């Protein structure tokens, strides 16, 4: 039986491949009325498009409801992201509105897409960017969270 060795060094004169850089963060859109660089929730155009499509599929009007983003205890890293539609905001929620003109300049009369965040979750989500990824292997929302120090492989849980 022949043995095959694994080469662990670069041969003399050969160049090592350049290190791979992390994927760049997509440009995010701040909520209506939020100053640029505010520590609120930002959303990419890809995520806004997906939210709009999903709301239409679920027959939820942007004027009546919105997307609730939050944190729950559990998951392999300690905290898990939760995302679901809600018919209305709660009393102490932070409400982020995103004009649909970011997606279609002609949608000036359309109600904004709204994201609801409860006060406890906001502690962990302030400064976060919500993105949407669609590849051959995965279709999912990505939470780009500056408070996350460790994340699980699937990206649905994290720790601070």
Image (spheres, grey):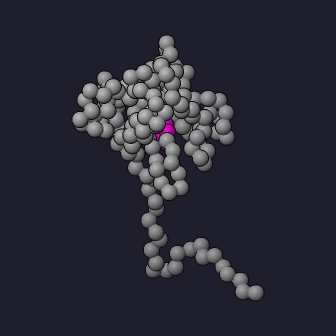
- Residue 44: percent from left, percent from top: 38, 39
Determine if the magenta segment contains residue 56.
Answer: no
Residue occupying image coordinates x 53% and y 31%: 84
- Residue 142: percent from left, percent from top: 49, 42
Residue occupying image coordinates x 46% and y 47%: 133
* Stretch of the chain drawn in magenta: 142-146
Is residue 122 at all visible to an observer of this figure? no
- Residue 116: percent from left, percent from top: 47, 24
Quarter of the image where one finds residue 43: top left
Locate the C terminus and report the quarter of the image it occupies. Answer: top right
Q: Nearer the viewer, residue 52 or 126?
A: 52
Is residue 26 at all visible to an observer of this figure? yes
Q: Residue furthest right?
A: 1
Q: Is residue 136 above or below residue 102?
A: below
Residue occupying image coordinates x 38% and y 29%: 113
Q: Is residue 66 above or below residue 155?
A: above
- Residue 91: percent from left, percent from top: 49, 12
């Amino acid at each position: 039986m022949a043995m095959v060795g694994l080469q662990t060094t670069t041969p003399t004169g050969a160049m090592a491949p350049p290190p791979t850089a992390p994927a760049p963060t997509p440009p995010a859109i701040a909520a209506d009325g939020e100053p640029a660089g505010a520590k609120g929730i930002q959303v990419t155009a890809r995520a806004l498009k997906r939210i709009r499509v999903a709301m239409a599929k679920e027959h939820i009007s942007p004027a009546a409801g919105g997307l609730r983003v939050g944190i729950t205890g559990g998951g392999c890293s300690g905290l898990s992201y939760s995302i679901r539609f809600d018919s209305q905001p709660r009393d102490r929620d932070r409400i982020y509105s995103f004009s649909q003109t970011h997606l279609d300049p002609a949608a000036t009369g359309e109600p904004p897409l709204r994201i609801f965040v409860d006060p406890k979750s906001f502690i962990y989500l302030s400064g976060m960017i919500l993105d949407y990824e669609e590849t051959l292997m995965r279709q999912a929302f990505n939470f780009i969270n500056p408070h996350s120090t460790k994340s699980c492989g699937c990206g649905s849980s994290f720790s601070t």
